[in-house]
Image: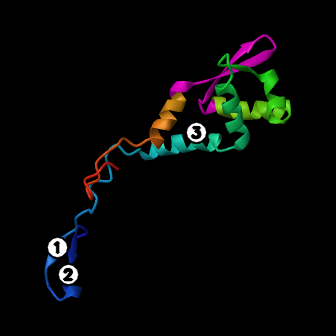
Amino acid sequence: MNVDTKSDVAAGGGHVLPLVSCCGSTTGDALTDEQAHELAAAFKVLADPVRLRLVSLIATSPAGEVCACDLPESVDRSQPTVSHHLSLLVTAGVVEREQRGKWAWFRLRHERLDELATVLTAPATTSPRTGTPS
């Protein structure tokens, strides 16, 4: 028996039927293994509540950027802990850092956040099963 065929012998016949996907192709524009690992690492960084809060604080800042000196009190963490979390966000490409004198300033990298959001937002397509938008 081929991997792409199925016998209906159990149903009393001796016919070999081709396997047909019930919903169409599953490949499309799917991520490669490498892309999936890279994006998973970025999502893992964002999955921490403190880091997610830091991203939120930067995103909602009227100036579009935040000085590191203002963040420890905002998230109720020590300065070294906040620095560690910010470093991980920078490494993941979610925020960028600019040194200004003694303090570092952080702003979002919107193109990276858009890239992450795109993975979570599937394009509207028509379901082959129902013929309606999915």
Q: Give the SS element for disc 2.
A: loop
The spot of residue 64 in percent (x, y) is 65, 19
Q: Is residue 14 above or below residue 21?
A: below
Q: Position of residue 120 (x, y in %)?
A: 47, 43
Q: Residue 42 got which mark?
A: 3
| Circle 3: residue type | Ala
| Circle number at residue 17 | 1
The magenta-colored residue range is: 91-111
Q: Residue at x 71, y 43 (%)?
A: 49
Q: Which mark is residue 8?
A: 2
Residue 106's disc is: none
Q: Are marks 1 and 2 in contact (CB under 8 Å)?
A: yes
Looking at the image, tell me whether mark 1 or mark 3 is earlier in sequence order. 1
Which mark is first along the chain, 3 or 2?
A: 2
Neighbour tally class for label 1: few under 14, some 14-19, many 20 plus, Cα within 10 Å: few
* Residue 27 in picture, x, y percent from top left: 32, 50
Left or right, residue 36 beside residue 51:
left
Task: Kindly indicate the quadrant of the structure image that contains residue 44.
Answer: top right
x and y, in percent, of residue 115 in the image? 48, 33
Looking at the rendered structure, the kind of residue marked 1 is: Leu
Three-letter code, disc 2: Asp
- As displayed, is residue 63 above or below residue 83? above
Residue 96 included in the magenta stretch of the image: yes
Q: In the current view of this chain or complex, which residue is farthest to the top?
A: 101
